[in-house]
């Protein structure tokens, strides 16, 4: 290999390392001083609890088919952008509607409060939205 080729390869390696070390969050992200919307740590839900996440403008899982003898608490967790507030509305009033939820808020319903096994329909409405919201169902019929 020629000396010129070695110099070019070395120069390119230095440029790539410098560019990689200089990358980072944008100025607007640093100014907002918000924590990231997701984390790399996960924690298992407590026994009898099913977690429904509100994140990135969607709910997951949006359709639950569960046995209330095995899972009796449904926990809605707001993990979306702090600028988004949500409310959970139950179609037939099986459960009280949630208060307005901000990032980090949790709202729980207890399926033992149902008098019969059924399908519970709800929607997660973005505060100030004119749309019908994100639909979800909880099927306790098995």
Image (cartoon, rainbow, N blue to C red):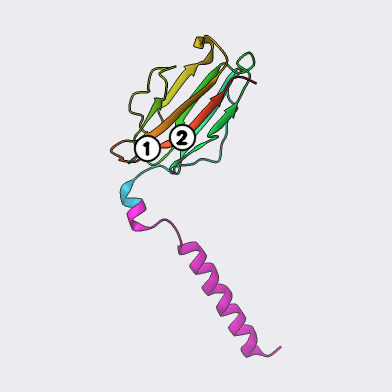
Residue 44's disc number: none
Left or right: 104 as drawn, with respect to 111 = left
In percent of width and height, residue 84 lies at 34, 39
- Element class at badge 2: strand
* Residue in view at x 44 percent, y 16 percent: 94
Q: Quadrant of residue 56?
A: top left
Q: Quadrant of the N terminus?
A: bottom right
Q: Quadrant of residue 28?
A: bottom left
Up-down relation of residue 64 to residue 8 (above or below):
above
In percent of width and height, residue 126 lies at 35, 37
Farthest residue in the right direction?
Answer: 1
Taking depth in this image into account, of 20 and 71 the one nearest to the observer is 71
Residue stretch rendered in magenta on the structure:
1-29
- Element class at badge 1: loop
Up-down relation of residue 12 to residue 113 (above or below):
below
* Residue in view at x 43 percent, y 43 percent: 57
Magenta span: chief secondary structure: helix
Q: Quadrant of the C terminus?
A: top right
Residue 69: within the magenta?
A: no
Q: Dot 1, how many residues are within 10 Å of its Cα: few (below 14), some (14-19), or many (20+)?
A: few
Farthest residue in the left direction?
Answer: 128
- Residue indicated by mark 2: 135
Would you say the residues marked 2 and 1 are in contact, meaning their CB atoms lie under 8 Å apart? yes
- Residue indicated by mark 1: 132
């Amino acid at each position: 290999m020629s000396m010129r080729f070695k110099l070019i390869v070395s120069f390119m390696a230095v440029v790539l390392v410098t560019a990689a070390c200089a990358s980072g969050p944008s100025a607007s992200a640093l100014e907002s001083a918000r924590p990231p919307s997701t984390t790399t740590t996960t924690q298992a839900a407590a026994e009898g609890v099913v977690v429904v996440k509100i994140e990135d403008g969607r709910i997951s899982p949006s359709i639950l088919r569960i046995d209330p003898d095995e899972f009796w608490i449904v926990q809605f967790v707001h993990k979306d952008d702090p600028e988004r507030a949500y409310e959970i509305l139950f179609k037939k009033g099986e459960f009280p509607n949630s208060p307005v939820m901000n990032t980090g808020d949790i709202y729980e319903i207890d399926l033992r409060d149902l008098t019969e096994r059924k399908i519970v329909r709800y929607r997660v409405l973005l505060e100030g939205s004119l749309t019908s919201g994100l639909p979800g169902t909880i099927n306790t019929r098995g």
